[in-house]
Amino acid sequence: MRNWWLWIVVILLALPVAHLQSEEGMFPVSDIAALNLMEKGLKISPADIYNPDGICLVDGICRVNGCTGSFVSPAGLIITNHHCAYRAIQNASTADNDLLVNGFSAADRAAEIPSPGYVVRITESYGDVSQKVLSVVKPEMTFTERTRAIERRRKEIEKQAEAANPAIRAEVAEMFAGKTYVLFEYTFIRDVRLVFAPPSSVGNFGGDVDNWEWPRHTGDFSFMRAYVAADGSSAEYSPDNVPYQPKKHIQVDPRGVAANDFVFLLGYPGRTARHKTAAFLAYEEDVRLPFIVDLYQWQIALMEEMGLEDRAVALQHSSRMRSLANVEKRSRGQLKGLKRAQITAGRAAEEAQLQSFIESDPQRFQKYGTVLNEIAGGYSGMGETADYELTISNLNNASRALYFAWLIYDAALESQKPDLERESAYMDRNVARTVQRLKLAAKDWHPETDQAMLQGMIERLSRVTFPADAVVDKEALLADLKALSENVVTAKWNEPDFLETLLAQSPDQLSKSDDPFIKVMAKLHPEYARLRGLGKQRSGKMDKLYGSLIEVKQEFLKTQFVPDANGTLRLTFGRVEGYSPEDAVIKTPITTLSGVIDKTTGVAPFETPQRVAELYAAKDFGNFALPGKEDLAVAILYSTDTTGGNSGSPILNAEGNLVGVNFDRAFEATINDFAWNQSYSRSIGVDIRYALWITGKVFGADHLLKEMGVQTQ
């Protein structure tokens, strides 16, 4: 197995049509000039993609909550995924007006639906602040002190940047653990509205059956719009707000793509772990991933059962269920990939070579000789208490009532501290959004489901061994939780006035509360505080060790590395191409509407709107038909390097025009979080021709096509 963690590992691939190269890497956009993209198929200058001194494609890319989006008109229109807009669609739905089932199309801007909880970020600038961050680290610090000092320094830098420019939002991102830090400055837009969403029979066609699979026939796209105050400043929702005018919008290309076309993506990939060791991978493979698969399968099955006879309940569960299902199937794919590709063993072999290099020089051995063993010891220690820590940490995720009580109690305690010493979620700059997330979650709270969740978690917690340093007694906690489970259905968490009252109280007032959940959380919170402190201690130790590991790997390989993805802006490139996941199985890179019709059974998740079937039968594809065929492209497959957070990323052609919207990976590519392989790492997107046809031809929203500069006839 090749060394996956090289800065640039070029995989040469002989093609019958064009000699292009696919390459591992979620590259920081400041580094793309060194990638020779024009030699690999790009037909515009790299400066057209990223130019810190001028307008470029990067100015048309935004982050939409945890996803990516693209501005596709001068009036703040954003295209992203249906599953990225899902929470907004679900929040606006009722049993009588179910937008998930029916879809939504705003006839004009006045009809666009506000989407509480959504924010849009546009990267404005970034710069290295590693020296400023690490200047606070002292040799005599404990690991916990080291973590807290770095956290505080990052917050100081962010607050200083925002004080200097109140129009921006600042974030210091760790690029290499314990080693390099970059200050990003964002335009931060808080008024985001739903414009168009196809029904789930299009936007989630195939459901969890097809999730993470190829071939795919899903129209996973939606449109939203960003709004600002009349003076252009960021503002909360107001009917007086006006559409945001981006510096750049991405031109939609209704011609789409063909096999072997060069494509690239810009976006905000989440977190990868390609610089982690074999010990980390073993922990994931043997401990955490199996735990998550088992826990989430149970939670999903429970919520499905509770919503079976009541669509209103099913709507309350829908967003949470979809999120859990996505992680559960991805985790299963990662487990399969880790075993199939023997990635842990391959990483261990690479580390054995590195250790030999370390031991070949006395000075090098003195500095780095124990790094790998110390990292391995850290993960081994985590494994010993993992069952307990994972179970109790998920206790107040599974039970939403406990989550509400925990957040309220935690926020009250943190509010007593100076702003820079608080956990980030409770700082003055963040607390309003934290409270907003709480209220949105409470809106969808279903007491009977929560009661069953709590009872199930009690049973799971009863099976684990509490560590000796736990500050909560197992039997006493179980007794308290059992008593709570009898009170869940009478709790008042979905009453806004009740939440507001608790949120306004001090820790002392909360400790005297009559609410049974607050009472139990007052007892349980010290254990969560202990686990939080333990996490900081581990982070301090691991960050220091991984910083040393990066240093010696660079010395060994005489190269630089691409930092792991961390939610910051990146570029990746490849080409439209299929793959062979198994012997004698070849998967081609473009699916069609014929495949949708073939899969349609009339039963969820393989339902298709009648209008789609009628237009297909008439072969009425407008301007969007595949060249020379009476059919329509639906989804495309390509060899870019993506992970979570790339959902909604624009698929851009060689001219920098938008030809699709990324939404998934093939099942084999779930392993991208840990390693990338040209032979099977494939990303999946909706072809822009299908999105335009659904929007304009099927649902009649021609005004949106005109806004994007696309001819409707």
Image: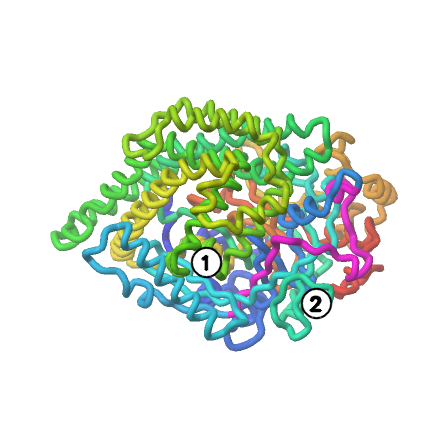
Residue at 27%, 53% in the rendered image: 145
Q: Nearer the viewer, residue 415 or 713?
A: 415
Residue 439 located left or right of residue 90: left
Residue 581 located left or right of residue 107: left
User: Is residue 111 a member of the stretch shown in magenta?
Assistant: yes
Task: Give residue 427's mark.
Answer: 1
Q: Of the residues shown, which amino acid type is indicated by label 1?
A: Met
On screen, residue 545 above or below 208: below
Which residues lie in the magenta part? 97-124
Task: Give residue 241's mark.
Answer: 2
Q: Is residue 189 visible?
A: yes
User: Residue 246's quadrant in the figure?
Assistant: bottom right
Q: Is residue 16 visible?
A: no
Mark 1 and mark 2 lie on one chain; the one further toward the N terminus is: 2
Residue 258: horizontal and vertical position, in percent? 66, 52
Residue at 52%, 66% in the rendered image: 186
Residue at 49%, 26% in the rendered image: 483
Indicate the quadrant containing the C terminus: top left, top right, bottom left or bottom right.
bottom right
Regarding mark 2 in the picture, which secondary structure is present there? Answer: loop
